[in-house]
Image (spheres, helix red, strand yellow):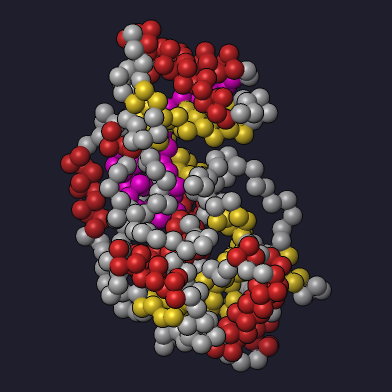
Amino acid sequence: MSTELKSNEFRMVAKTMFGLEDILAKELEDLGAKNIEKLKRAVSFDGDMVLLYKANYLCRTAISILKPIYTFEANNEKELYDNVYTYKWEKLINSDGTLSIEPVVNSTIFTHSLYASQKTKDAICDRLRKMFSQRPTMTRENPDIILNLHIYENKVTISLDSTGESLHKRNYRVATGPAPINEIVAAGLIKLAGWDRESNFFDPMCGSGTILIEAAMYAYNIPAQYYRKNFAFTKWPEFSMPEWKRIREDADKEICDFDYEIWGSDISGQAIKIAQENIDNAKLHKDISLFRNAIEDQNPPEGKTLIITNPPYGERLDVDDIFDLYALIGTTFKNKYAGSTAWLITSDFDALKYVGLRPTRRIVVFNSNLECKFCKYEMYEGSKKAKKNNYDNQDPNEALYEYNEQSDEFEEPDGLDLTPDFEEDND
């Protein structure tokens, strides 16, 4: 049910990664967003500047927060130029200021995103030059205004980017290992797993520690952008420093204690060193325990524990080694973690078969450009009958992959539509 906009409210779009739209929509709802609509790789919603500040600072699964300001149709480059030229850019952009245009184009009309961006830039600069005899400088280095140019076929939307550098750059990483998981994806996995923060958390193949740090930030209710200082909206004319300061202070007051353990281990000494550097930089060294051990040798903390891990994918190991590794993961889960729930994310679907355990849920997510499956394994204590009862009792609305008794497999739904309305940033 839609609600009427107040005079100080406007439409916004929060970009995210494929598979995290529901999580982001819930985050925005909790912040007070109205008229929420889930798109592909994005969520649109209504709110005011206060909500825009909060969404940037607190949403764990948002890439950026956009404020659409101009929408039109263009069937050729002249229509694109003419429509852009008619907008009153002088009310938004200083002719002696700096500007950046970030294009996202999915169109059979405009086949080159940089060319569409160039025509948009020409129209804006030509208008301002005609009015003021000078034009803004184009730069990617901390510009005054960042415009997002989104073209889907002939529909053009120009938005103000309130974020600037992607929100996955939390500013706690000082080093990375090979193929680190995106911070937004890590935060999303924790939410998708349904962790209630009433148990231990363990990552037995922790790499550079991203999943552990995101888990600790969630456990202690540390704001997603607690370590970050720069946002594009701070250069907007309507920006209110007192309001922004109040929002940060209020959010930081909600940081709380956590009564359980967060553990990580990895077989690589270099990975543990990198993870420790990142954890230290986030000032979470007292809250996360690291151990150098192979997965089969490391025991999780005692008590109820949620396991989430991101093992190496095929491009990081030889084929035989990756199959052996995934078989070892399955054996270790089965033999050492009875009574626990483990989640594994991977883009290596062939290796995934070697885990040898049947997942009770599989969710399609993307880690940057890689399509991945996020699989849930419940290691039951007791008989196979108890396991079968669990499969029978699972909520079909909660499982993106349904169990087929004849094939004894979980099957993917047909017609999965990956065509984006808004595409994610991958750098």
* Farthest-out residue, left: 242
Q: Position of residue 405 (x, y in %)?
A: 77, 74
48 inside magenta stretch:
yes
* Farthest-out residue, right: 406
Say which residue appears at 17% left-offset and 41% top-offset. 242
Q: Position of residue 38 (x, y in %)?
A: 53, 46
55 inside magenta stretch:
yes
| Residue 258 shows in this picture | no
Write the start and end of the magenta stretch as one range.
45-74
Q: Position of residue 248 (x, y in %)?
A: 24, 51
Q: Position of residue 6 (x, y in %)?
A: 34, 33
Say which residue appears at 58% left-offset and 33% top-offset. 105
**Left or right of 246 on screen, residue 143:** right
On screen, residue 186 above or below 42 = below
Q: Nearer the viewer, residue 111 or 91?
A: 111
Q: Nearer the viewer, residue 73 or 48?
A: 73
**Left or right of 12 on screen, residue 109:** right
